């Protein structure tokens, strides 16, 4: 039965090497539990895969994509030894080097004493060491 199946498959996939690779991939897929598209007839998975290819009941392009995906090697990510630093600053990081606390700023804003734009620019310049 297998010889006749191979002869039928060569009409669908002319390259015998590609045929072997596709049939092997389909046989692996069948053993993983994919549904059969032809009757098993007490045949093993490779023979069933060849019969499916010969009957044209499975799309060869998706089988090729499965084969390529199974042969790809994805490198494992390298372990990180560096400390992960949060890129978004929190309030404690923002106000850490300042002379005023977030509570004091909130109190000034609530009282309306936040200062003019010039006062704010001068405070920023002092914090940055600009005078």
Image (spheres, grey):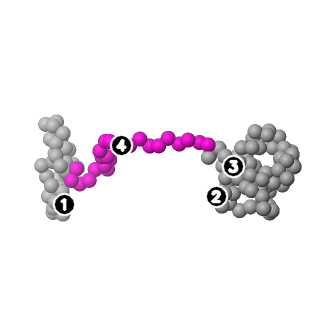
Q: Earlier in the sequence, mark 1 or mark 4?
A: 4
Q: So how many labels did they put on this image?
A: 4
| Element class at badge 2 | helix
Instruction: Single out the mark in the foreground, 1 or 4.
Output: 4
Q: CA distance from mark 2 to mark 4?
A: 35 Å
Residue drawn at point x = 79 percent, y = 38 percent: 15
Label 2 or label 4, whichever comes before in sequence order = 2
* Secondary-structure class at tag 3: helix
Label 3 and label 1: CA atoms lie apart by 66 Å
Magenta span? 71-93
Main SS category, magenta section: loop
Which numbered disc covers residue 32? 2
Q: Residues within 10 Å of mark 1 (few under 14, many from 20)?
A: few
Point out residue 84 in the picture as x, y percentages from the top left corner: 31, 46
Q: Nearer the viewer, residue 78 or 88?
A: 78
Select label 3 or label 1 by which is in front: 3
Closer to viewer: mark 2 or mark 4: 2
- Asked whether the residues under the numbered discs 1 and 2 touch, taking CB atoms below 8 Å apart as contact, a structural biologist would say no
Rendered image quadrant of residue 35: bottom right
x and y, in percent, of residue 76 in the image: 47, 43
- The percent coordinates of residue 74 (x first, y second) are 53, 42
Q: Is residue 7 left or right of residue 111?
A: right
Sequence-wise, the earlier of marks 3 and 1 is 3
- Which label belongs to residue 58? none
Q: Is residue 80 magenta?
A: yes
Residue 34 on the magenta segment: no
* Observer-nearest of 121 and 99: 99
| Residue named by callout 1 | 106
Which residue is the site of mark 3?
A: 25
Q: Residue at x 44, y 43 (%)?
A: 77
The residue wearing badge 4 is 80
Q: Can you see residue 14?
A: yes
């Amino acid at each position: 039965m297998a010889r006749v199946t191979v002869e039928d498959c060569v009409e669908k996939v002319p390259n015998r090497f590609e045929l072997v690779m596709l049939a092997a991939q389909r046989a692996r897929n069948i053993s993983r539990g994919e549904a059969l598209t032809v009757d098993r007839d007490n045949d093993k998975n490779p023979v069933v895969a060849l019969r499916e290819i010969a009957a044209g009941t499975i799309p060869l392009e998706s089988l090729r994509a499965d084969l390529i995906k199974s042969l790809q090697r994805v490198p494992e990510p390298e372990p990180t030894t560096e400390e992960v630093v949060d890129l978004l600053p929190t309030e404690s990081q923002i106000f850490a080097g300042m002379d005023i606390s977030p509570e004091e700023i909130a109190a000034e804003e609530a009282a309306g004493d936040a200062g003019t734009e010039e006062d704010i620019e001068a405070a920023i310049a002092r914090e940055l060491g600009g005078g």
